[in-house]
Image: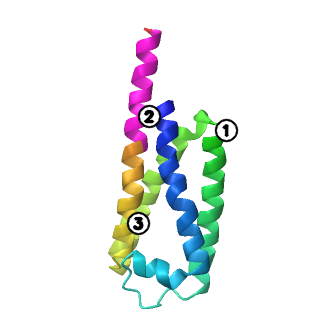
Amino acid sequence: MKRTHLSLYYLVGYLIPSGLALLFAPGLAFQLLFSNSSGAYGDVLPRLAGGILLALGLLVFQIVRRRVEQLYVTIIYVRVILLGILVGLFLYSRDPLFISLFVVVGIGVVLTTLSYIRDRQSQKALQG
């Protein structure tokens, strides 16, 4: 599962920095993600979201560091569900923020999924 393991660094690489950005500079984070909310999200909930992203990033970092391969597929499924939620939030709000997030998360899902498929094929070739 070497490729899958490496692909998860992308996930850690955006969860932790974006969590810190939302926690300490939510206005700048929203601006960088092309939000047109004009402060509609307030100041407290984005900081809460930042804290949650930071916590998730640290959890995924531990999964990657410890090579908990049993959770690799779960990490893919969770992000696929999140993609659906992001589509729904975009349709509800029309805020380009959700398109930006969809692209970032989507790249990671594709990267991890393709890596996982290649790793499984390599394992089967070695076994068979």
Read off the magenta span: 112-127
Mark 1, other Cα within 10 Å: few <14 / some 14–19 / many ≥20: few
Is residue 121 highlighted in magenta?
yes
As drawn, the label of residue 66 is: 1
Classified by dominant secondary structure, the portion drawn in magenta counts as helix
Residue 83 spot, x, y in % from top left: 40, 58
Circle 3 residue: 101
Mark positioned earlier in the residue sequence (2 or 1):
1
SS class, disc 3 = helix
- What is the C-alpha distance between the residues marked 2 and 1? 17 Å
Element type where label 1 sits in the image: loop
Residue depicted at x 52% and y 48%: 9
**What kind of residue is marked 1?**
Arg
Give the label on residue 116, or none.
Answer: 2
Judged by depth in the image, the label closer to the viewer, 3 or 1, is: 1
- Queried whether the magenta region covers residue 1, the answer comes back as no
Amino acid found under the numbered disc labelled 3: Leu
What is the x, y in percent for residue 92? 37, 77
Q: Is residue 106 left or right of residue 66?
A: left
